[in-house]
Image (spheres, rainbow, N blue to C red):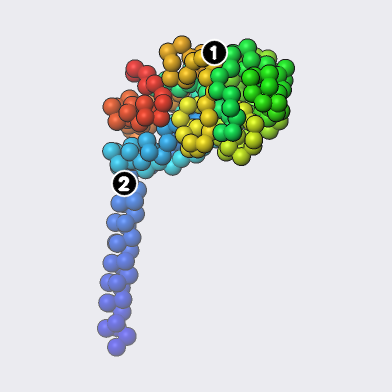
Amino acid sequence: MLRKSALPLTAVVSLLFLCSMISGSIASAKKTLRYSSSAQVREAFGMEGLNAFTEATGIEVDLYVGSSSSAVHRLMNGFSDIASTVERLHGRHQQYGYREIPFCKAPLIVITNAETPVRNISSSQLRGVFSGMITNWKELGGPEMSIVVVVPGKHTGAFKNFRKLALKRSNVKYDYMAYRSADVVKLVHRIPWSISFISQGAHTINAAIKVIKIDDLKPSDKNYPYHQTFSFVTKGELGDAAKKLIDFAFSEKGKAIMRKNGMAPLPR
């Protein structure tokens, strides 16, 4: 009886082993892209874009979201296949094989709490607010209420770009600082009389946030003064999955998603 049952048992074990080998082969054949993204790019391009990419290519995305600098550092240390950033690379990076691929521009917008009645300020008033020279909404044509300044972390691309573009590299004075750039939207929504800045697209996650015009210009106007460029960053020979993500961003479907979120796709 023991010898008769040993053969079927061996056959079962062999069959299970074979099935596991086939299953492992199928799993390994499924492509995954390791993508490190700036929080602003993630919010503006959105899961809608990444889901559409997966649907179109069959490639799953292993997504990390952080600051622009952390996204690029992960690429440099081999933790991702491609990164996205709102900061320009240093010139020395090109010498080490890093490549910057701009794919869209997005306005860097000024946002305020929904209860704030002020809807337009000058660029000089904006510098005054974020440099600490203007501290009350009355100085901007609003009620006599203290201005609460909210900023993203100093390590974020939004903070660095805003300081360079709007404040001409002057120091920024603030009341609250968010870790990620996209987090300022939640803070501005919750804090009365607050003001902050963020990339166009990210603010759409909360319709209660109001956008302030600068010098009578809306973010969609041609001469609006503050824009950020979103770029992919790669190193060395481009992998197939990373190449397909870049192709998707420049495709009509990818560009349509960007336009929907208020961004301007760039030519390849």
Q: Secondary structure at mark 2?
A: helix
Mark 2 or mark 1, which is nearer the start of the sequence?
2
Q: Secondary structure at mark 1?
A: loop
Quadrant (top left, top right, bottom left, bottom right) of the C terminus: top left
Amino acid bearing label 1: Asp
Measuring from the top left, give residue 175's x and y in whole percent. 71, 30
Which of 10 and 236 lies nearest the eye of the viewer?
236
Measuring from the top left, give residue 171's x and y in whole percent. 70, 18
Q: Marks 1 and 2: CB-CB under 8 Å?
A: no
Q: Is residue 171 left or right of residue 183?
A: right
Q: Is residue 129 left or right of residue 221?
A: right
Tell me the CA gap for discs 1 and 2.
54 Å
Determine the image quadrant of residue 264. Answer: top left
Q: Which mark is residue 215?
A: 1
Which of 2 and 178 lies nearest the eye of the viewer?
178
Q: Which mark is residue 191?
A: none
Determine the image quadrant of residue 151. Answer: top right
Mark 2 burial class by Cα count in 10 Å: few <14, some 14-19, many 20+: few
Measuring from the top left, give residue 220's x and y in whole percent. 43, 19
Q: Is residue 54 left or right of residue 235?
A: left
Which of 186 and 42 lies nearest the eye of the viewer?
186
Q: Nearer the viewer, mark 1 or mark 2?
A: 1
Question: Is 123 rendered above or below residue 192?
Answer: above
Query: Taking the image as drawn, is residue 101 in sight?
Result: no
Which residue is drawn at the image coordinates 54% and 13% (left, top)?
215
Q: Which residue was labeled with disc 2?
A: 29
Determine the image quadrant of residue 90. Answer: top right
Measuring from the top left, give residue 145's x and y in whole percent. 70, 28
Quadrant (top left, top right, bottom left, bottom right) of the N terminus: bottom left
Amino acid bearing label 2: Ala
Question: Is 83 rendered above or below residue 139?
Answer: below
